Image: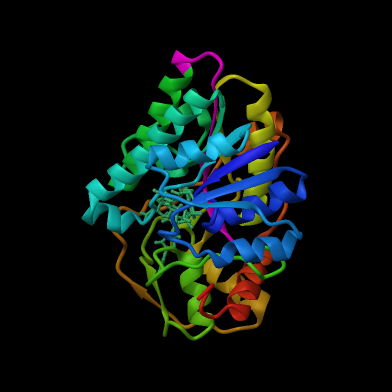
Amino acid sequence: MKILLAGGAGYIGSHTAVELIRAGHDVVIADNYDNSCPEVINRIEKITGIRPVEYEVDVKNKSGVKKIFDENLIDVVIHFAGLKAVGESVQLPLKYYRNNIDTTLTLLEVMEESGCNNIVFSSSATVYGEDAPAPYREEFGRGKCSNPYGWTKNMMEQILEDAAKANPELSVVLLRYFNPIGADATGLIGEDPQGVPNNLMPYVSQVAVGRREKLTIFGDDYPTDDGTCRRDYLHVTDLAIGHVKAVEYADREKGTNIFNLGTGNPYSVLEIVNAFQEANDIKIKYEFGPRREGDLPEFWANADKAKEILGWEAKRGIVDMCRDTWNWQKNNPNGYR
Ligand code: NAD
Ligand code: UD1
C-alpha cells in the first residue's frame, strides 16, 4: 500500500516509516519540520535502502496537501502531525488548537475529495482523563483532560468519529499511545527534542551524554511503592510495528476502531533511571524535586484488544528500551543537528 505519513519526520513517524518500508509498503512523508529535521529522510534511506517520497508542507494548508494526493494514489493516511508539548500548550493554547485541529480537518477534507477512506490517528492515553482507573481500557471512552494538548486529542478523536459516522466508507483507527521511548536498533534515528526535554527518557539520556547536569525527579511522595510515578513505557519500534498492523486493519475494516498501544506493565521513574544505569553501565545524577502539575500517580494500558484484534503486542523489554535510547544518544549527542 501507499501510505501518507503526515508529520512523518518526527520521532514516532520516522520509526513508523522504517517499519512500513521493512514490511514492503510505499511511504510518502509530509512534514513542515516544525519539530523535526530533513536529515531524518536521509537516515530512513540509510536504514532501509529506500528513500521515502518527501513533501515539505504545512499539513494545515489544503492546496499543499491536495498536491500530494494529486501526485500519489494514497491508500491510508497516518496522522502524526501535531504539537505535543503539554506545558507549552497551557501557555499557548490557541497555537495548539489551531495546529492540531486544522491539520486534522485539512487531511479529512482532502481525503474526502480524493476518495481516500482510511486514516490512522496518533492519539494518547491522556484522553482517558484524570479520573479513569488504571489499567485503561478502550471502552472507558474519553474523560476530562488537564491541559489544552490533551483536549486537542480528545476533540480530534471526536471529529474523526463524527466523520466516520457520516461516511460509512471511512475507516478511522484511533491509536492511544502510552509512553514511547527507545530508538531504532541501528541508532540512526531517535528522539531529538528541541530545547529542554519535557519527557523523562530524553532527559535521562541527555544527562548521560553530558548535555544536562542532573535529572530532577518530579515527586517522591506518590502513593506508589517507591513514591515516584508509574507509566507504561513501550519501545518506539514496537509502537511503529503497531502502526503497520493498524494500516492493514484500516484497509479492511470500516467505522471507528480504538486501540491502546502499551505493554500493560508500568515502571516507576526510579525503576527507569536504575534500568538505564544498569543496561548501559552509566551513572545518572538525579535529585528529587516537587511534583509536576498535572501528573497522575500512575496509569498503564490494558493491551488485550490490540493483541486480540490487530495481532500486536509489545515484544521489547525495558533493557532494550534503555540500551537503544543510549545507542542513539551516544552516537548522536546533539541529535540530528
Ligand atoms: P514529533 O514532534 O516528533 O512529530 C510530530 C511531527 O509533526 C514533527 O515532525 C512536526 O514537524 C510535524 N508537524 C507538526 N505540525 C505540523 C504541521 N502543521 N504540518 C506538517 N507537519 C507538522 O512527535 P512524536 O513524538 O513523533 O508524536 C507524533 C504524534 O503522536 C503527535 O501527534 C503526538 O501528539 C502523538 N503522541 C505522542 C506521544 C509521545 O510520547 N511521543 C504520546 C502520545 C501521542
Ligand atoms: C506526558 C504528558 C502526556 C503526553 C506524554 C507524551 C504531562 C502531564 N503529560 O506524559 O499528556 O501524552 O507526555 O508526550 O506532561 N519526569 C521526571 N522528570 C523529568 C521528566 C519526567 O520525574 O524531567 C517524570 C514525570 O513526572 C512522570 C514520568 O517521568 O512521572 C514520565 O513523564 P513524561 O515522560 O513527561 O510522560 P507523561 O507524564 O506520562
- Which color mode does the image show? rainbow
Instruction: Tell me the quarter of the picture where residue 72 sits.
Output: top right
323 or 27, nearer to the observer: 27
Whether residue 237 sits left or right of residue 61 in the image: it is right
Residues shaded magenta: 165-181
Identify whether 47 is placed above or below 215: above
Residue name at image x 49 percent, y 60 percent: 225
- Where is residue 99? Give x, y as percent: 33, 45
Is residue 166 part of the magenta span, yes or no? Answer: yes
Q: Which residue occupies the foreground of this view, 55 or 165?
A: 55
Compared to 141, does 60 lie above or below?
Answer: below
Decide which of 262, 250 is in the foreground and name it. 250
Q: Taking 102 as reference, is 325 left or right?
A: right
What residue appears at the point 63 percent right and 79 percent down from the top-left corner?
Answer: 331
**Residue 223 appears at what percent x and percent y?**
40, 55
Residue 228, compared with residue 157, is above or below; it is below
Q: Position of residue 4 (x, y in %)?
A: 58, 41
Determine if residue 250 is in view: yes
Q: Depth check: give the residue in front, 73 or 278.
A: 73
Let me know if residue 266 appears in the view: no
The residue that appears at 65% across and 46% down in the rendered structure is 27
Q: Is residue 215 magenta?
A: no
Quadrant in the picture for residue 107: top left
x%, y% of residue 16? Answer: 63, 50
Q: Residue at x 30, y 68 (%)?
A: 290
Quadrant containing the N terminus is top right
**Number of marks:** 0
Q: Where is ligand 2, by quadrant?
A: bottom left
